[in-house]
Amino acid sequence: MPEEFTPSQTPTLETTIVPSQASELVKSESVKSDRVADFEKISRIISPYFTVLVGLYLYESNFWIGFLFIGLGMFALLKISIADIKKAIAAIKSFFGLQEEL
């Protein structure tokens, strides 16, 4: 029959971290976060090129999907956002006098 413990007798598991161990934990976490940051930077650089390459591959079999991927990749490479496109369209409309005044 298992022994029963009262709350005051319940065994506890305590972990003590020595200051030298704490600094090692902080170092390992900072190394991991540095690696993650480096990987994210590399990924931001490579992903637009990958998108363009996929678009070029798909361009032969499906023109529209390939064209879409190439366009998205080019926008990412040139760092053009939707807000920039909206501003350009508004500038063109105002140049031709098609902009509606609110």
Image (cartoon, rainbow, N blue to C red):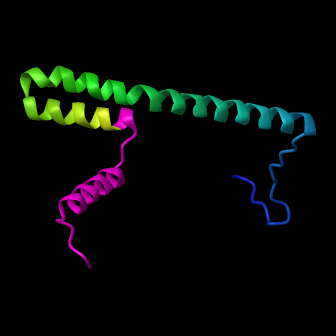
Instruction: State left or right for residue 22 relative to residue 85.
Output: right
User: Which of the 4 image quadrants contains residue 8?
Assistant: bottom right
User: Which of the 4 image quadrants contains residue 23?
Assistant: top right
Q: Position of residue 42 (x, y in %)?
A: 50, 26
Instruction: State left or right for residue 97 relative to residue 50.
Output: left
User: Which of the 4 image quadrants contains residue 64?
Assistant: top left
Q: Is residue 84 magenta?
A: yes
Instruction: Between residue 92 and residue 78, name the one nearer to us.
Output: 92
Kindly give the residue lying farthest to the bottom in the view shown. Answer: 102
Count the numbered circles shown. 0
Instruction: State left or right for residue 82 relative to residue 19.
Output: left
The residue stretch that appears in magenta? 76-102
- Residue at screen point 38% across, 29% down: 47
Instruction: Between residue 2 and residue 99, name the one nearer to us.
Output: 99
Q: Is residue 87 magenta?
A: yes
Instruction: Between residue 80 and residue 72, name the one nearer to us.
Output: 80
- Residue at screen point 20% across, 73% down: 100
- Residue at screen point 92% across, 39% down: 19
Q: Is residue 38 above or below residue 93?
A: above
| Magenta: main secondary structure | helix
Kindly give the residue lying farthest to the right in the view shown. Answer: 19
- Residue at screen point 80% across, 66% down: 7
Instruction: Between residue 25 and residue 1, name the one nearer to us.
Output: 25
Q: Quadrant of the C terminus?
A: bottom left
Q: Position of residue 79 (x, y in %)?
A: 40, 39
Q: Position of residue 75 (x, y in %)?
A: 32, 38
